Image: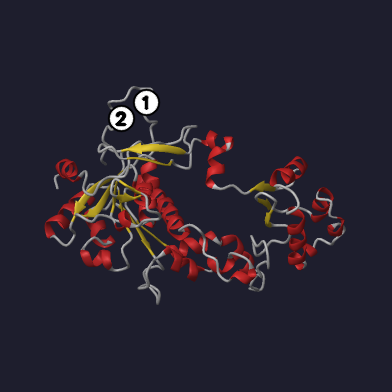
Amino acid sequence: MIASPPTDSARSPAEALPERPLEGLLVVDLSQFLSGPYCSLRLADLGARVIKIERAGAGDLSRQLYLSDTEIGGDSTIFHAINRGKESLALDLKDPADLAALKRLVGQADVMIQNFRPGVADRIGVGWEEMHALNPRLVYGSISGYGDDGPWVKFPGQDLLAQARSGLMWLTGDAAQGPVPMGLAVGDMFAGVALSQGILAALVRRGMDGIGRHVETSLLEALVDLQFEVLTTWLNDGRRLPTRSQTNGAHAYLGAPYGVYAAQDGYLALAMTPLDRLAELMEMPDLAGRPASDAFSARDAIKARLAERVAEKTVADWLAILQPADIWCSEVLNWSQLMQAEAFRRLDLLQTVTRDDGVSIDTTRAPLTIDGRRPAGRRAAPRVGEHSETIRKEFGL
């Protein structure tokens, strides 16, 4: 087991980072783009030392995957966001010497992660069987698009395409809109979360029996699991497909008022609420006295009427009426408004990470606390091969 380098030795005790539970674990990450790197980011946030294997020269393809025209230190913001706190070792895996160096490194590692297309890892000599024989204690994590078998196995494991095949895209939006993709790469992210959970479980088991394991997931598996609540309803409800709302759609299985409504100056979200109570508070006698079944059977008509009423006041007006009555409602915030909220500031979810070459980037922090303290790291994403020389010396590569 390899200890993390003492990155905070020059800081005073008051500045030292809190101990993190995965300190001392070595993760070798061969993955690219989002799903695998998101998994290793979670492990890095918890203290693991992550050595990112990149192609010499070009590096991870996500370095050039731009979400906007913002570039920091020659790389995209998405690369910085998902690779902060990691080290970079540049290798050419088609070069026998570099491949041998990688295997020596994996032989000393606790975890290896890869998201090659199925069959590629075996073909280049870094598949599970070979790596397990090399290092029986190794926990080996794999992410694919649709598993390692079946008619979809050769299709691109890309988030939008996985959303399309998973049913999630069909489930989202108003009835007349057609399929609506999520505004985030949720397949990539949730596959990374699933893999990190599996890796942590395998590490716990290894602590009992000393044996590594192969943990596998896919974008499709993660997206199906994300829908477990509504899929379970469908599977046990005669497999009747739900009907999305014609307007203000938010959940295909929930009736009125569940949805988002335009007010005079913004948007108001209304969750599960008895219509009689809402009718009284919003001064809408036409909604009073309806049977509970109307919330679904007359969903579109009720939502249309609510939309008319909500539009007559500001968001603040409605919150002042509804929140004191314990109605489940909220203003809809954009990022600027979220950052100004005291509730958000108290969570301390943002940080600035830096690099020796002067690169500095504002980003998020780990979404959990341990013993009341949020794990933190101050190092930005690495340059391609930034740590190659020191890693080679340290591990005898």
- Kindly state the secondary structure of the residue where label 1 is placed: loop
What residue is disc 2 on? 8
- The mark nearer the N terminus, 2 or 1, is 2
Nearer to me, 178 or 124: 178
Q: For this view, does 287 lie left or right of residue 242?
A: right
Q: For this view, does 323 lie left or right of residue 370?
A: right
- Residue flagged by tag 1: what amino acid is it? Glu
Say which quarter of the image contains residue 233: bottom right
Evaluate if marks 2 and 1 touch, with contact meaning CB atoms under 8 Å apart. yes
Colouring scheme, one of rainbow, by chain, secondary structure, one colour: secondary structure
What residue is disc 1 on? 15
- Kindly state the secondary structure of the residue where label 2 is placed: loop
Residue 70 position within the rendered picture, expressed as x and y whole percent measured from the top left: 37, 50
Q: Is residue 42 visible?
A: yes
Q: Is residue 203 visible?
A: no
Number of numbered discs on residues? 2
Position above or below: 357 against 64: above
Q: Which residue sits at x=39%, y=31%?
A: 18
Q: Which residue sits at x=44%, y=55%?
A: 189
Which of the numbered marks, if any, corresponds to residue 364? none
Residue 378 position within the rendered picture, expressed as x and y whole percent measured from the top left: 35, 36
Position above or below: 131 against 241: above
